[in-house]
Amino acid sequence: MILAIAKREFYSMFFSPLAWVILAVIQVILAWSFFTSIDYFFSIQSELTTIKNAPGVTDLVATPLFEVASIILLMVIPLLTMRLISEEKRNRTISLLLSSPLSISEIVIGKYLGLLFFIITILSLITLMPLSLSIGTELDLTKIFSGVLGLFLILAAFSAAGVYMSSLTDNPMIAAISTFGLLLFLWLLNNTTAADGGSNVLHYLSLHTHFAPLLRGILNTRDIAYFLLFIAGFIVLAIRQLETQRLQS
Amino acid sequence: MSSLISVNNLTRRYGDFCAVNNISFELAAGDILGFLGPNGAGKSSTMQMLSGNLAPTLGEISINGIDLLENPKAAKASLGYLPENPPLYKEMTVNEYLQFCGRLHLIGKSQLNSVCDSAIERCGLGDVRQRLIRNLSKGYQQRVGIAQAILHSPPVIILDEPTVGLDPIQILEIRKLIKTLGETHGIILCTHILPEVQAVCNRVQIINQGNLVYSSGIDVLLNKQSTQFEISLASVVDIETLAGNDAFSAVQQIDANNFIVDTSMSAEQLSAYIVQQQWGLCRFVPRQASLEQIFIELTAGDIGISDAAISEESS
C-alpha cells in the first residue's frame, strides 16, 4: 500500500513534462561540468606525475562533479517536492487517501518513497558519467561509492524538508520557495561560521559540514546519523502537520 | 438488523462556529438515506467526519461495528466515499486510476482486474477506460468518482452530490445504479436535489444549521393523505361557484379552467362529487405532501419554528 502510493507518485512525475525537463537540464549542466573537469585534469596531468601522493582522477573529476550536483539539486529538489502534498490539498484529491484504509504516516512515507525513487534515477544518471571513465583508467571505486552515498543522503534530506514544507500550504509555489529558502539557509550556515570561526553548534547544523567528509571518502557514522535524523525529523513533522490539519481544518 | 453506521452525539466546531451540533443517527443495511440540507447546513462536514477526513470535536462514529476514531484503518476499509469534488488524479487514465484505488483498498493483484472491470461496467465507463481523466467531460469524471466509491464493494457507501453535472439520461442511470446498490449496501446520499431523494431514498434526514431537524421513512411522507387537488374543468365554472361550495375549504384559480382546491374529502369521494356536479372534469391530480414543502418549512425559518414543525411531524 505504501508502495502503491510510492509507485503512483513516481509515475505521475513522468506524466508531466517537469520530470523530463529536470532530468535533461541536470544532465546537460553536469555533463558540461564533467567535461571541463576532465579538460582541467588533462591540462595538469603532466605536472601531477611529478608530485608525490598526487590527487587521482577520482579526486579531480568525480568529487567536483558530486559537489556541483549537490548545489544544482539544492535548487531543483524544491521543484520536485512542492506539489507532493500541497497539490493534493488544492485539488482535494487528498480526501481519496484520507478515506482509504491508510494511516497518515503511510501516506506521507509512501509519497516520500516515490520521490526517493526519482532521486535514485537522477543519481544513477549522474554516477554513470564518472563510471564511464573506467573504460580508460582505473577509478577509486570506494571513494565514488562514498560520494554517491553522500549525495544520496543529502538529496534525501533536501526532499524530507521539501515534503514538510509542502504539507504546510496548499500552494505549490509557496512550498517551493520556502523549501529553497530553508535549504539555502542550512547550507550557508557553514560558510558564515567558518569565516569568523564562530559557533560550533551552527557549524554542526549545516548540511554541508556533513556532506564534505563523505565526498572526500570519509564514511563517518556521525554524519550518516545526522542525515537520517534530519530526514526522520522532517517526515515526522509532516505527518504531525497533516494530523493537525485533520483536527482543525 | 445491525446498523452499518451509527453516529452518536456528533459535534464539530470551527472555532466558535458550530457546524454540526450533536447529531445522532443510524444506517441499516438496505437503507438509502437521503441527507438533505440547505447550503452550509453542515452536510459536507458530517460526510467528511464519517469518512475520516475531518476529526469530530465530540461524539462517536462507528462503521460496520468498528469505531472510526479508535480503529480508523479497519473502519475505513468498509467505506466507499465520493466527496463533493471527485478526488481524481487527472493525469491518469480511468483504468490506471481505478487500479490505484483498488490497491489503496487492499484488493489483491489477482482480483484487481475483475474488480475494476465490474466497476467500469456498472458506471458505463467502458468506452473511455483508456482515456485520460483530464480529457473527460464533467459527467464522465463524476462517474469515475462513483466507480471509485463502489469499486471495493464496501458495506457503506457515502455519495456527496453524485449527480451534479450529469445529463438527464445519466442521472436516471446513476439513480438506477444507486437503487441496485442499495439492495445490498447501506448508502448515504447527500444532495439538495429533492426529487432525487424522493426517487431513490427510503429514508430522509434534513439538517439545518448543524441540527438534525427531520428524520423519517420516505413512505411515511408519500402515503400522507393529500388534502389538495388540482382539477381541470371543461365547462367554465366561475370561482365563486366553487368558493361558495361547502365541499371545499379553500379554492385557488390558476386560469379559466384550472383550479387548486383544498378539501376534507378523500380523492375517491371528491372525483365522484365533481362528476356528479357535471362540471366536465378532464384532469384530476392529488397534490402530494411533497418533500419540498417539508424542506422549506423546516429550513426557511429559524430553529424555533423548525422544532415546532418536528413535533408536528412526529405526532
Image (cartoon, rainbow, N blue to C red):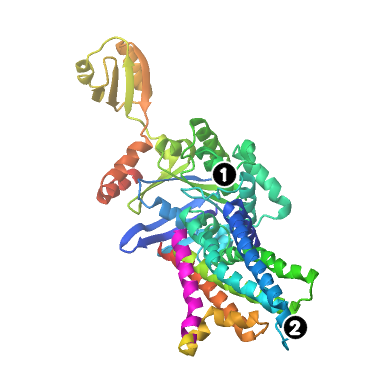
Q: What's under tag 1, amino acid-wise?
A: Ile
Q: Which residues are magenta?
A: A170-194
The residue to which callout 2 is attached is A49
- For the residue pair B183 and A99, the one nearer the viewer reads as A99
Which residue is pictured at 67% across the width and 84% down the height? A219
The residue to which callout 1 is attached is B133
- For the residue pair A48 and A152, the one nearer the viewer reads as A48
Name the quadrant of the N terminus of chain A: bottom right
The chain ID associated with circle 1 is B
Examine the rendered structure and indicate whether residue B123 appears above or below residue B87. above
Tell me residue B300's x, y (percent).
Answer: 28, 43
Circle 1 SS class: helix
Q: What's under tag 2, amino acid-wise?
A: Thr
Which residue is pictured at 55% across the width and 61% down the height? A80
> Is B255 placed left or right of A157 in the picture?
left
How crowded pointer 1 is (Cα within 10 Å; few <14, some 14-19, many 20+) is rated as many
Label 1, label 2: how far apart the Cα atoms are:
63 Å
Tell me residue B49's x, y (percent).
Answer: 45, 58
